[in-house]
């Protein structure tokens, strides 16, 4: 009994010291001296930082506690290690098990924690057994409810076993060297106590100790090595970190963009924001939070200390295991009467959902999509026609579950009743809302051509569409109508496997209206070198078939092309037909008019993505429709911020890219109605920068093999700067200096 009381006192004192709720001492058994064992359960608040319990990601810290108090510190650190993991990677109907084995001499014990994440409110079952502790048998079992999100409880079970020096090993990743037989574990702990101790605190400044490599640190440079506004890739341990100096302060963050892993050190930097060199995603160097898209996740940040003239960076190695960081999210509270209904299954819908939860919204969120798959990376379809929905999903199912988002798939909204604050679905069901977000995107344009309804005439919008095309083109004669990005990327994907690929377009060169004649002709030559045939300044007059199946394409100039299948890539129209007569302001083309916060003319009704026409800051607030992947993300974020009461007007600069046979062309800006182009570099060498001008001002830039010029230009426009036509004639490298001075 005395031992039970002592253990309870220690547990209570420990919980008070670290500010943890005390869940009680489970039990204590006493064996022949000097062996003692006890088990206790500790609980902590996890927020949205929950454990990655995949078997490949076990914890990797070894401790050598020599007393109950030191063991409790180790258990607390175990909990912290668990909390530092940001994501769950669980599989339905699968239980992930964490095994901890502690051994000293002939005495050992095991901790087996099985965690099942099959549904909300899952169970955590922890079993601690002592099979050979001086013939002392003790099995303790505790069951607790586990939920996820802000203020949720996260339970872990720790056990203290037997001898004067107990070895607690957590996980097995990496190399962990056990002290030799003649080495006292207490000495291995350091000199804070003859029995061994170490410091634990919220900033993760763990003191050095043998066997613990969870925290690495390095002097990365001198304070004078960087000027204000400069960034540099540095090494901390075996890992690369981005170091930035801004107004005399140093910041350290992950060096990989969370979209495709591009090195941020090769990107552009201005005023606390670093922009990816490949696709334009932006990150706040102070917080690591993503500020502009594509990509969904933020990057890690690390502690920086200036010691005399040395710049020291400390990093938790767990952050290097996954360079993507998911921001903390709130959960649904039944007492919150707000109901946000998001209609659409694209990036605008996903980002709006995430933004709401990241900004503390606790009302109900429902996402409705007419597609049968979770929202996915649609722009990959034209590049990888055989892609499966789960392979390119923007977020997995558990993400929506953990953020308390109800997702209704295969449900199409057919009517909106704004007065009654409800929508009607195709099956007759009705859903209510207090706030409505419309993000239904577009549908492929289907030209009015005879025979267009024949079998094997495809449009490309969904995974199902892409997979159907993929099943047809091998060793077949393929025709693509349209020299748009989708049409050209589909041609790239098919030509090495098809019998032939022919592209039909009504302009004199591919992408003429986007890149101009010189670059368009270069793109055509690149395709022709791979076997693609072009029929420019032409169009399809008729699709001819036999038994209802396409066999031939007849062009307007009389040419007949053998065609086993044809892919239509002639643009999209907004999916807003169901909004006619709803009271929303629509353009003649069916786009929804919104302001800079994505608000429509109806209170508490928002629109985002390809269906909107909005004021574009870098174009003098001209009302425009921009169907870019990156811009749809930003629309969702802007709407989410406004709904959450943290409104911020959209000021994002359009940014897109296309990949043609491994050549990636970047583009930023808005050059509708441009009157001139200034070209640097050599197209034949696959390296160029093009500045598009309107009057005396540069409105857009495109490049190939000349990073990060386009990102620098985008950054300049985002900061309210501009580039004159005369400045555009200078060496493009001068843009970096202009950006630093903006």
Image (spheres, rainbow, N blue to C red):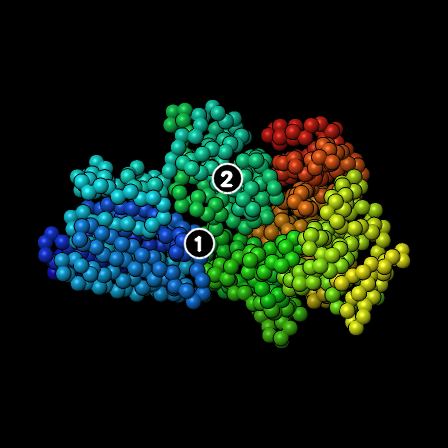
Q: Quadrant of residue 129?
A: bottom left
Q: Residues within 10 Å of mark 2 (few under 14, many from 20)?
A: many
Quarter of the image with the C terminus is: top right
Quote the CA–CA distance across marks 1 and 2.
Answer: 20 Å
In the rendered image, residue 471, in percent from the top left (x then y), is placed at 66, 63
For residue 403, say whether it is visible.
yes
As drawn, the residue found furthest toward the right would be: 558
What residue is pinned by disc 2? 255
Q: Which residue was labeled with disc 1?
A: 87
Q: Is residue 134 left or right of residue 221?
A: left
Residue at (47, 33) in percent of width and height: 234
Q: How many marks?
A: 2
Q: Is residue 1 above or below residue 513?
A: below
- Please name whichever residue, 470 or 398, is drawn nearer the observer in this view of the structure: 470
Residue at image point 84% right, 63% down: 542
Element type at mark 2: loop
Q: Nearer the viewer, residue 514 or 93?
A: 93
- Please identify the quadrant where the N terminus is shown: bottom left
For this view, does 688 lie left or right of residue 325? right
Residue extending furthest toward the bottom = 428
Q: Quadrant of residue 526?
A: top right
- Tell me which residue sits at (70%, 39%) in the image: 702
Nearer to us in this view, 102 or 570 = 102
């Amino acid at each position: 009994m005395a031992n039970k009381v002592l253990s309870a006192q220690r547990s209570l004192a420990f919980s008070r010291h670290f500010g943890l709720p005390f869940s009680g001492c489970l039990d204590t058994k006493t064996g022949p001296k000097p062996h003692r064992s006890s088990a206790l359960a500790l609980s902590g608040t996890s927020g949205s930082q929950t454990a990655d319990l995949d078997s490949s990601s076990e914890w990797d810290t070894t401790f050598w506690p020599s007393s109950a108090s030191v063991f409790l510190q180790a258990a607390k650190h175990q909990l912290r290690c668990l909390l530092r993991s940001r994501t769950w990677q669980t599989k339905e109907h699968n239980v992930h098990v964490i095994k901890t084995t502690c051994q000293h001499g002939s005495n050992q014990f095991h901790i087996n924690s099985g965690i099942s994440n099959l549904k909300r409110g899952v169970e955590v079952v922890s079993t601690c057994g002592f099979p050979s502790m001086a013939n002392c048998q003790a099995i303790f079992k505790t069951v607790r409810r586990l939920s996820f999100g802000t203020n949720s409880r996260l339970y872990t079970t720790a056990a203290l076993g037997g001898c004067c020096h107990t070895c607690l090993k957590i996980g097995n990743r990496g190399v962990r060297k056990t002290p030799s037989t003649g080495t006292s574990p207490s000495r291995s702990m350091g000199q804070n106590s003859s029995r061994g101790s170490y410091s634990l605190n919220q900033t993760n400044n763990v003191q050095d100790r043998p066997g613990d490599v969870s925290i690495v640190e390095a002097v990365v440079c001198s304070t004078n090595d960087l000027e204000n506004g400069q960034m540099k890739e540095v090494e901390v341990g075996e890992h690369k970190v981005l170091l930035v100096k801004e107004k005399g302060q140093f910041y350290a963050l992950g060096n990989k963009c969370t979209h495709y892993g591009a090195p941020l050190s090769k990107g552009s930097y201005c005023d606390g924001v670093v922009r990816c060199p490949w696709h334009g995603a932006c990150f706040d160097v102070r917080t690591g939070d993503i500020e502009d898209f594509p990509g969904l996740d933020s990057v890690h940040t690390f502690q920086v200390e200036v010691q005399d003239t040395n710049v020291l960076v400390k990093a938790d190695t767990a952050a290097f295991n996954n360079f993507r960081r998911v921001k903390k999210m709130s959960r649904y509270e039944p007492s919150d009467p707000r109901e946000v209904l998001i209609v659409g299954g694209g990036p605008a819908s996903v980002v709006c959902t995430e933004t709401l939860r990241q900004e503390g919204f606790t009302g109900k969120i429902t996402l409705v999509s007419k597609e049968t798959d979770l929202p996915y990376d649609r722009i990959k379809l034209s590049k990888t026609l055989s892609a499966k929905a789960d392979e390119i999903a923007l977020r997995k199912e558990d993400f929506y579950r953990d953020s308390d988002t109800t997702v209704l798939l295969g449900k199409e909204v057919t009517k909106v009743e704004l007065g009654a604050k409800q929508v009607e679905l195709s099956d007759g069901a009705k859903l209510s809302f207090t706030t409505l977000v419309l993000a239904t995107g577009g549908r492929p344009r289907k030209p009015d051509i005879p025979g267009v309804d024949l079998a094997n005439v495809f449009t490309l919008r969904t995974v199902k569409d892409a997979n159907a095309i993929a099943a047809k083109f091998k060793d077949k004669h393929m025709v693509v109508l349209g020299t748009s990005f989708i049409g050209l990327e589909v041609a790239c994907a098919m030509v090495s496997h098809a019998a032939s690929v022919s592209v039909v377009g009504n302009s004199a060169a591919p992408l003429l209206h986007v890149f101009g004649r010189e670059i368009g002709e270069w793109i055509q030559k690149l395709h022709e070198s791979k076997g693609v045939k072009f029929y420019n300044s032409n169009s399809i007059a008729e699709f001819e078939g036999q038994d209802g199946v396409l066999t031939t394409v007849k062009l307007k100039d009389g040419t007949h092309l053998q065609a086993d299948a044809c892919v239509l890539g002639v643009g999209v129209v907004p999916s807003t037909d169901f909004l006619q007569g709803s009271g929303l302001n629509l353009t003649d083309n069916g786009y929804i008019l919104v302001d800079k916060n994505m608000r429509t003319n109806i209170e508490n009704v928002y629109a985002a993505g390809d269906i909107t026409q909005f004021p574009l800051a870098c174009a003098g607030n001209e009302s425009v429709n921009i169907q870019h992947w990156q811009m749809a993300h930003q629309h969702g974020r802007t709407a989410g911020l406004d709904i959450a009461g943290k409104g911020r007007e959209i000021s994002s600069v359009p940014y897109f890219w296309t990949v043609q046979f491994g050549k990636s062309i970047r583009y930023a800006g808005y050059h509708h109605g441009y009157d001139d182009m200034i070209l640097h570099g050599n197209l034949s060498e696959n390296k160029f920068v093009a500045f598009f001008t309107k009057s005396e001002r540069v409105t857009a830039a495109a490049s190939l093999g000349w990073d990060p010029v386009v990102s620098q230009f985008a950054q300049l426009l985002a900061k309210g700067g501009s580039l004159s036509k005369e400045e555009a004639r200078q060496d493009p490298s001068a843009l970096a200096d202009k950006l630093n001075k903006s």
